[in-house]
Amino acid sequence: MFIVIVGCGRVGSSLARTMLKEGHDVSCLDEDPEAHARLEIGSDKAWEDQGGQFTVGAALEVEALTAAGIEKADVFVASTNGDNTNIVIAQIAKRKFNVPNVIARILDPLRAEWYERQGVHTISPTRIAIEQLEGEVRVAAQRAAGGAPRQGAADHEDDEV
Amino acid sequence: MFIVIVGCGRVGSSLARTMLKEGHDVSCLDEDPEAHARLEIGSDKAWEDQGGQFTVGAALEVEALTAAGIEKADVFVASTNGDNTNIVIAQIAKRKFNVPNVIARILDPLRAEWYERQGVHTISPTRIAIEQLEGEVRVAAQRAAGGAPRQGAADHEDDEV
């Protein structure tokens, strides 16, 4: 399967490395040439020698997307640091290039929800972080309800009496 | 239960609103007075009128943490935008103030893993995003393996022959 990933930061590069290891063809696009180094973390071979592709170019330029291979992508992942950019290129991938699987990373959970309803498949790390923290705090609350009272809190309450 | 949340951005404020609604006492600390507005999203009552507490101050100043109520916290959540700040204040909460439940949001997944091993409970939205994207791409791969080939890809392969 041919996977095009735009935005080769922590998330994009990690996904790229994993997917290449799992036997897929992977092409990354980033405007920063130095992002290439992230693709070689944990490997002693060059990204290209492992079979990967890397293109330097602006996410919003169709020429750059074409150079990265968007026309033959089976999966397109928009994972730049900009929510707006991710939304726009996800729509280009879907509507102009008919990529069958398009996923956009959207930090703003409200926008992620809105675009999800518009048919753009989104991943929102922010929403996930909120949900995870809520879960953790609820677990702590249950533990506190069943266990000994917090010592500091007890001291403080004594002070207030 | 008394929850202190430092960093009242999207994640911190959303967590604060949910936990207040669930009946907990919630105190937020942020250096930006305007962060307060996030606590009132979706409510027609002032945060304080709902029973919430908000303190303006720097996360790394013990006076500010004390004003926010760290001494009697049952749960302490470090969710500023800075990984280093979150690590430092999580350790202050744990070691200096003996808060029984301390959670730090760490964007860098490698650091999150390292600190987790050091006993700091961490949440890494970046790691979660990577795992979610990997899952999505694997699902797409299975779908592609079982279904019709990508039309654009087929065209392209014809071109190459």
Image (cartoon, coloured by chain):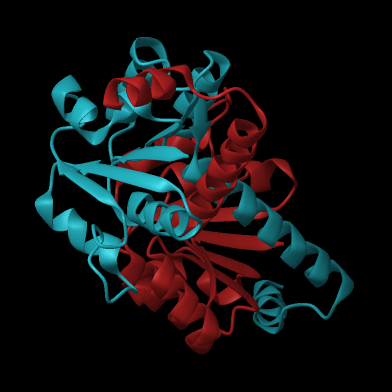
Chain colours: A red, B cyan
Picture layout, residue A10 above or below residue B150: above
Residue A29: % across, % down: 42, 56
Q: Residue A23 vs residue A116: left or right?
A: right
Q: Residue furthest front?
A: A161
Picture layout, residue B92 above or below residue B155: above
Q: Residue A9 vs residue A27: left or right?
A: left
Picture layout, residue A48 above or below residue B110: below
Foreground residue, B25 or A134?
Answer: B25
Residue A74: % across, % down: 66, 70
Picture layout, residue A127 above or below residue A71: above
Which image quadrant is residue B107 in? top left
Which image quadrant is residue A144 in? top right
Say which residue appears at 79% left-offset and 77% top-offset: B149
Say which residue appears at 56% left-offset and 47% top-offset: A132
**Residue A22: in sight, yes or no?**
yes
Quadrant in which the C terminus of chain B appears: bottom right
Residue B143: % across, % down: 81, 70
Say which residue appears at 85% left-offset and 77% top-offset: B147
Say which residue appears at 59% left-offset and 47% top-offset: A135
Counting every numbered tag in the picture gives: 0
Residue A151: % across, % down: 46, 17
Q: Residue furthest right?
A: B146
Q: Residue B61 vs residue A93: left or right?
A: left
